[in-house]
Amino acid sequence: MNPERYLPRSLPPAMKGLTDLALDLRWNWNHCADALWKSVDPERWEATEDPWLILESISRKRLEALAADSTFLNELHRQLANRQAYLRQSSWFDKSHDEAELGTVAYFSMEFGLSDALPIYSGGLGVLAGDFLKTASDLGIPLVGIGLLYQQGYFHQALDTNGDQLAFFPYNNPTMLPVLPLQGSDGEWLRVSVELPGRTLWLRGWQAQVGRVSLYLLDSNDLLNAPGDRGITGELYGGGIEMRLQQEIVLGIGGWRLLEALNISPLVCHLNEGHAAFVILERARRFMEQTDRTFSISLLGTRAGNIFTTHTPVAAGFDRFPRKIMTQYFSDYAHHHLGISMDELLSLGHDHGSDDSNFFNMAYLALRGCGRVNGVSRLHGEVCRRIFLPLFSRWPKHEIPIGHITNGVHMPSWDSAAADALWTEHCGKGSWLSTLETIEQVWRRVDDDKLWSMRNQARQPLVKAVRRRLVRQHAACGVTKEGLMQCLQVLDPNVLTIGFARRFAGYKRPTLLLADPDRLTRLLIDAQRPVQLIIAGKAHPQDEEGKRMVREWNDYLRRPEVRERAVFLEDYDMGLAAELVQGVDLWLNTPRRPWEASGTSGMKVLVNGGLNLSELDGWWAEAYDPEVGWSLGDGQEHDHDSAWDAVEAEELYMLLEEEVVPAFYTRDEKGIPTAWMARMRQSLARLTPMFSCNRMAREYTEDYYIPAAAAYQRREAGNASLSATMKQWEVSLANHWHKIRFGQFSVQESLVRNLFQAEVHLGKLEPAAVQVELYAEALSHNSNPVRVTMDRGEMLAGSDNGYLYHATVPKGRPSRDYTPRVIPYHLEASVPLEANFIIWWE
Ligand SMILES: *Cc1c(COP(=O)(O)O)cnc(C)c1O
């Protein structure tokens, strides 16, 4: 659709292109066009930093003045040329891969945090998805995003005069958002539908642009829908369980239908969390139509092209829907579209071993419908293998088929002007557009005084921004003029600045630092070595504990002696997050291990030279080393043990008092804190490449997407003939596995090697359908278990389908460490993910 048709008034011809600039979310966060937008409307720019809003509200008079302003027009043309150069330049993906290898990747997510101008996110999951789209654009990865356009974004937080949280839900007027309606081939608004019980739900399609990447959004606010249904996409994570189910149907089933309506046939679907798992069913349904195969063959065929990333550290965090509601919504779909019974559909979301069959678990559906599954940090990968262990009982934990790709952040979205300047000086423009190999070496050579001066410069705008926010915050509470003047005194740009901003949820322990308020006060107001603290965070409106913790901070902050040293800023969002991570010296993170699956906010300080002090959880468990920052906790899990919380609070105070503060204030003759600079250098050099979304996106592309696309194509080729033979294999395993039986198992030891022999009776199974192995546990946490394939030897005398399997193993570990086992085998199958059978010699 021509975007200008969508504006209240047409732009003068001289300003052609300004609309594209305003609508490209990559362009409007990238700051290079800030001055341009500010010159259009300084006041609105200060208040919103939202180019589209400025364009929507500009007067005709102002437009005409700008059209005649050659400075403005020159800047506009410069920005348009920049954007064209970015869109056209050859990318990492073009240089290292072939477009045909991958086709298109469809990335499904319930939320996308791209900009506060498009408020369709609540927190870390959404910001990750947003950073990922920006990175995919930078790297040229052929990917589209699929999500929902909510009439209300996540709530805005304000504080009342008591310091209690208030929640406001502003209405997202779609015409005020940087999105355009999608147009169908007939010029009409592109719409798709999904079936709900007894009715059809119409969904409207929207598009947001993120550089080279398109994000497609759906909403149900269509006049053809019943009033209640128009509100299905009303609120992110709003409503009850039934509305959540409806939203997930819209995302998964509606999302796939929208792609089809757009003529996009992705080879790979990436599910960012289990919310989108219904796409598995719809994708298989379309595959059935195209190949005329059964649902189970189609599920097997499409599975290879689906990827599931789980972000949840506890089983209780998965979305589950009661069987009754599922049946209401899906029985027609199961019978008429999938050709299966409702019980068969439900079994895809059950844990067969437990009595929990009253619920349909979206993570289980995702696990059964995806060919690759991963957690979001090394530690989280381990935690996931533990969570899903019950689904793979009898398999060693090590072999639970869940890997990990550690999250990262889109560095250019989070760097300060001062950091950007220093990065550009030393690494050149575009340092985040390729493979980051040189970054480490570069930072090792940068002078201490340059690093220190970047830090000092970055603190100034933060202090200004905090004061400005505080004035606005207090003015809304009716604070007197004198009170507002006091706001202009808070913080000092030369003082060690600590940031703590995150969701106020119990497991994040946002009040750990308040364990001993007087001790905290002493730390803050020390005359020689003061500390200042900026706190922010929302509690979920229904989370009483979280809201109490917001209040607890605000009660503490009323103490007159800390007023100038510590503040609570309301309404934590991406804009505030950016200000904080750019300016603070230290980022604090205190979750209860292992509840922080990854965490990303601490990664955002890295590019700005900020340091981390964090619990050894999520990403920090793999990033931490004494040379790069500070760690809290003992790397063990202690549940909700309040005695242990007290131990960690004590450790936190000690670290701050005895390590952090002295490192910051011990200066050399030039006034430089050399110990602090040493850590800052290590953190910049080693951690920025590792925890950038650039590294993460390349890993997803090379380790997951490309192999998944290839595997899917093999299963789809020739009318899915491979899928059909794999299905036969699977069925014969299911029918005959229980007949497999071990006979004698023996070892012949010699001086240098041991010969193991095992008799295995395969019953009705083809020998090629299985593999017989010797298995030995890993010797230590850092090593891998040993797996040795046994060769099939002669048929056992008098047996029907029994063989003597043998393997020779060099001497070393005692022979009793090895146990033989039988597992399924197929060259194209992922075992045990797709064939969950195992039998051990006992
Ligand atoms: C980065 C970010 C998050 C994620 O923070 P973690 O606490 O590390 O999970 C949440 N909210 C906003 C607004 C962010 O910018």
Image: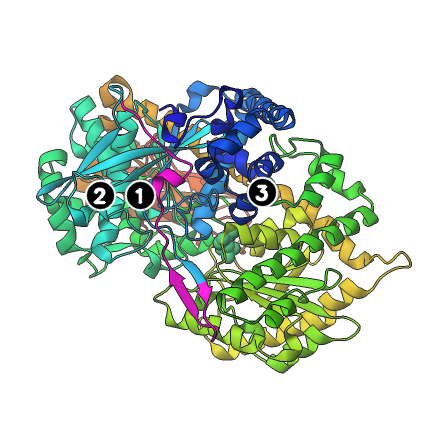
Residue 114's label in the rendered image is none
Identity of the amino acid at label 2? Trp
Task: Determine which residue is flagged by label 1.
Answer: 276
**Quadrant location, the N terminus:** top left
State the CA–CA distance, disc 3 to disc 1. Answer: 41 Å
> Which residue is at a point 68% across and 65% down the rendered structure image?
491
Give the mark nearer the N terminus: 1 vs 2: 1
**Mark 3: C-beta under 8 Å from nearest atom of ligand 1:** no
Task: Residue 188: tell me if it is visible.
Answer: yes
Residue 737's label in the rendered image is 2
Between marks 3 and 1 in the image, the one whose residue lies nearer the viewer: 3
> Which residue is at a point 24% across and 42% down the rendered structure image?
221
Query: Residue 495 at x, y = what percent?
Result: 73, 64
Q: Residues within 10 Å of mark 1 (few under 14, many from 20)?
A: many
- Relative to 191, say whether 100 is above or below: above
Q: Quadrant of residue 260?
A: top left
**Mark 1: C-beta under 8 Å from nearest atom of ligand 1:** no
Identity of the amino acid at label 1? Ala
